[in-house]
Image: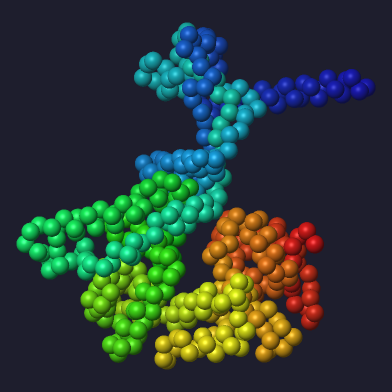
Amino acid sequence: SNSSSSFIFAKLLCLSALITVNLILKHISLLSQSIMSSKIRFGDGFSENELMLMEVDDHVLQCIEGKEEVSFKVEDREHAVLCTKDRTYSVKHADVSNAFYLLPPSNDDSTAMTFAPNETREVKCNIKSYFELKQIPPKLEKLDQILAQHPYPHHLLTVNNDSNDDSEDEEYDDGSGEGNRRKRRKDRTMNSSSILLSSLHDRVQASYDEIENYLARKCIVRDEDHLWALEDEFLFTAQDNLLNAITLQDWNATKLPVAEIYTHLKAEYSYPTTLSHAILKSLCDVELCEKGDIWRLDEEKVARVKAVELLMQASNPHKQWNFPSFMETWEACVPAGMTVKTNYLKGLGIIIAGGGGSNDIIRYFPASSLPRNPRERFKVLFKAQSVWNEKDIAPYLEEIVSPLQTYDSLILKFARAFEGPGGERLLNSIKN
């Protein structure tokens, strides 16, 4: 009968539960007889909020056991994140479905999990919830916002000064001490306008390595722990000064004399070594720069810098050019021996077909200006252009693609793919 079946099923459930309990007790080395002869009671200091559990993956556990730095980062109006040296995790508060009661270790020298016969143990606290961690892409949006608030004070470059040069500049050495006072005032002004690297690490919800890797890709001035952003107009001027110096001094663009460049830029424009280094790095092959022995101009970097200058200087409000005219002007702007390629424009501008090659238009649309939030980024992309092919949209997704957020997963979640003329895969808004 149904009642008999239910009774048998209930007995099986009870038997299964008993087997599970015994396995757990065996696993943690608890003796059933010892437990039955021991007393457990709620102590006077019982608390429900004294301790919290946190569920961690192997990476976080290894960091904790290896005594590596693991820290929580909390910002106003932002959820807390947990950071190791090279990863960022979201922290979600979750309730537990069962009660967890925590007991302190035994008073004797035996194993902490062993219950001595006739020993009274007090329940320390009840744990009702825990923190759940999930690895996420670093939250780097705020980094750009903070850096933008600390532009390099290039108006102070009227005095020849280099903090890395131990020699005393003649301009400061006037015999009265006033020159040294001016230098100290200038140094204080310079430092007060910077953002400290340590402060940046504290305020940005990303791991140490993720922040450092991002900074390495940015054109910033770095003097020990002080950082400054370079405003576009001054950056273009400084880059032009460097490129002109390379041409006029007839330096080999594939093997630049770094020390001579620093000396020249200091003498001609009062650029400190830290500033000259940032400008030089923005135009050179990064991999060779890191080796420290060979510095050479990177054709694509130089061409992209010149392209951005031209696009930003467009007189019309939409910052657009007739494409053939742009290509001709662009070709004339790069140093001799360098060429320009349409591929160098990826992530800088949108080329709009005008019914014929001579009527095509290029409009300034830099990937660096787009929000890092994927949903918001796709919204801006499809507002700028309703239909994209994969070749053109890929450069605009590079900054947000990661092992945790692949290109295919982004397209699947935020765009709709369809087949265009000739079988080409095209993308438009998922709302269409």
Judge left or right: residue 415 versus residue 194.
Answer: right
Q: In this view, does 119 lie above or below 214?
A: above
Q: In this view, does 70 lie above or below 12?
A: below
Q: In this view, does 118 lie above or below 407?
A: above
Q: What residue is rendered at 44% in x and 80% in y?
A: 302
In the foreground, 368 or 121: 368
> Residue 95: percent from the left, percent from the top?
62, 29
Judge left or right: residue 261 versus residue 288.
Answer: left
Q: What residue is rendered at 49% in x and 52% in y?
A: 142
Check the image and name the residue furthest to the bottom: 337
Q: In which quarter of the image is residue 212?
A: bottom left
> Residue 75: percent from the left, percent from the top?
49, 41
> Residue 227: percent from the left, percent from the top?
35, 57
Residue 34 appears in view: no
> Residue 256: percent from the left, percent from the top?
30, 82
Q: What residue is rendered at 47% in x and 57% in y?
A: 144
